[in-house]
């Protein structure tokens, strides 16, 4: 009797991991899988090398397609958290006056935003613009905007014969926001930075940019659309300003009687540089 009762006993099922509730249909994702995917987005290891690493440790690696699908959800969540954190830092740095001094610059995935001499088409395909506050002394990043021409999903659909999958916005889940034949614009990036600040109710007192000032014009345009009477003053970065002065001094033709003790052109230029500094 005891033996029959022992073998008829079945313990309830217990999950050895926690899950994140999923609003739609399908299996909920494990917390560990989401944490692993979030860690991968902050490193350069990639999904292929991660699967190779797990297989080398005699662990069953997850499918690469499943990791890509999960990464979209994870990246969207990370982007939302980053946006919320930047808005908090923006309000914290602007203070009660809701006025701030920012420094803005853009970085591309090439050496610059220019066209190819051979084809005439734009070379850069991605750019990231960051706005750093220069008011609290902590140099918080308070706003960011990315321009992107690349969309792997659209390229895959077109390779399979779907010519309607154009971008930007030509298919579901399109990641591109700039057409492939258009040039990346620092002015438009500045406008988005200004919209983010104006949307939070913050104005910009000073905008520090590089020598071309296109970012400043974009920021000032968006701020003035929300506050027509407000003027955004532009400041030049010390490095770019110094480089510009050096280039102009090299192109100048100095009179030989201006520096009687300087016998060569190089000596006269160096004397001008020291006076400017």
Image (cartoon, helix red, strand yellow):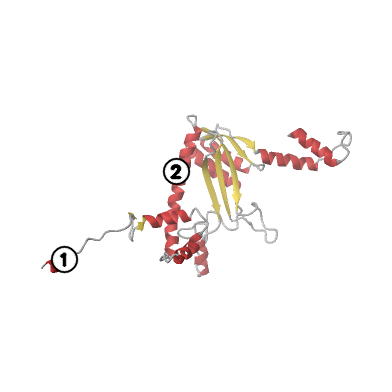
In percent of width and height, residue 202 lies at 50, 35
Near-viewer residue (213 or 49): 49
Q: Quadrant of residue 3?
A: bottom left
Quarter of the image with the N terminus is bottom left
Near-viewer residue (150 or 73): 73
In percent of width and height, residue 90 lies at 49, 37
Question: Along the horizontal axis of the image, is 181 left or right of 64?
Answer: right
Q: Which residue is mark 2?
A: 84
Local packing at callout 1 (Cα closer than 10 Å; few below 14, some 14-19, many 20+) is: few
Question: Answer yes or no: do the residues labelled 2 and 1 have beta carbons within 8 Å?
Answer: no
Q: Residue at x 84, y 38 (%)?
A: 254
The mark that comes first in sequence, 2 or 1, is: 1
Residue 267 visible in the current orientation: yes
Q: Residue at x 56, y 35 (%)?
A: 134
Q: Residue furthest top?
A: 97
Q: Residue at x 76, y 41 (%)?
A: 248
Q: Residue furthest front?
A: 2
Near-viewer residue (267 or 89): 267
Residue 201 visible in the current orientation: no
Q: Residue furthest left?
A: 1
Q: CA distance from mark 2 to mark 1?
A: 56 Å
Q: Which residue is mark 1?
A: 6
Q: Secondary structure at mark 2?
A: helix
Near-viewer residue (99 or 256): 256
Q: Secondary structure at mark 1?
A: helix
Question: Along the horizontal axis of the image, is 3 left or right of 60?
Answer: left
Q: Residue at x 54, y 40 (%)?
A: 194
In percent of width and height, residue 54 lies at 44, 63
Q: Quadrant of residue 259?
A: top right
Up the image or down, 89 lies above or below 18; here it is: above
């Amino acid at each position: 009797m005891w033996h029959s009762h022992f073998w008829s006993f079945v313990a309830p099922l217990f999950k050895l991991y926690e899950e994140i509730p999923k609003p739609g249909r399908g299996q909920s994702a494990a917390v560990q899988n989401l944490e692993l995917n979030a860690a991968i987005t902050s490193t350069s290891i990639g999904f292929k090398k991660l699967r190779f690493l797990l297989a080398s440790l005699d662990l069953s690696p997850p499918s690469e397609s499943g990791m890509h699908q999960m990464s979209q959800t994870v990246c969207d969540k990370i982007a939302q958290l980053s946006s919320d954190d930047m808005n908090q830092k923006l309000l914290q740095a602007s203070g009660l006056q809701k006025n701030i001094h920012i420094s803005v610059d853009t970085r591309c995935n090439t050496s610059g935003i220019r066209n190819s001499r051979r084809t005439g088409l734009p070379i850069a395909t991605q750019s990231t613009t960051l706005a750093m506050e220069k008011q609290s002394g902590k140099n918080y990043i308070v706003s960011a905007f990315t321009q992107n021409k690349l969309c792997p999903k659209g390229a895959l659909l077109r390779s399979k014969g779907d010519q309607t999958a154009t971008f930007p916005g030509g298919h579901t889940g399109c990641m591109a926001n700039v057409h492939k034949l258009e040039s990346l614009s620092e002015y438009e990036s500045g406008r988005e930075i200004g919209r983010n600040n104006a949307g939070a109710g913050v104005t910009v007192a000073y905008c520090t940019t590089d020598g071309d000032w296109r970012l400043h014009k974009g920021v000032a345009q968006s701020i003035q659309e929300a506050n027509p009477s407000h003027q955004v003053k532009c400041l030049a970065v010390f490095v770019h300003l110094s480089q510009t002065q050096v280039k102009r001094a090299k192109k100048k033709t100095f009179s030989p009687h201006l520096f009687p003790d300087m016998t060569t052109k190089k000596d006269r230029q160096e004397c001008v540089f020291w006076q400017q500094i």
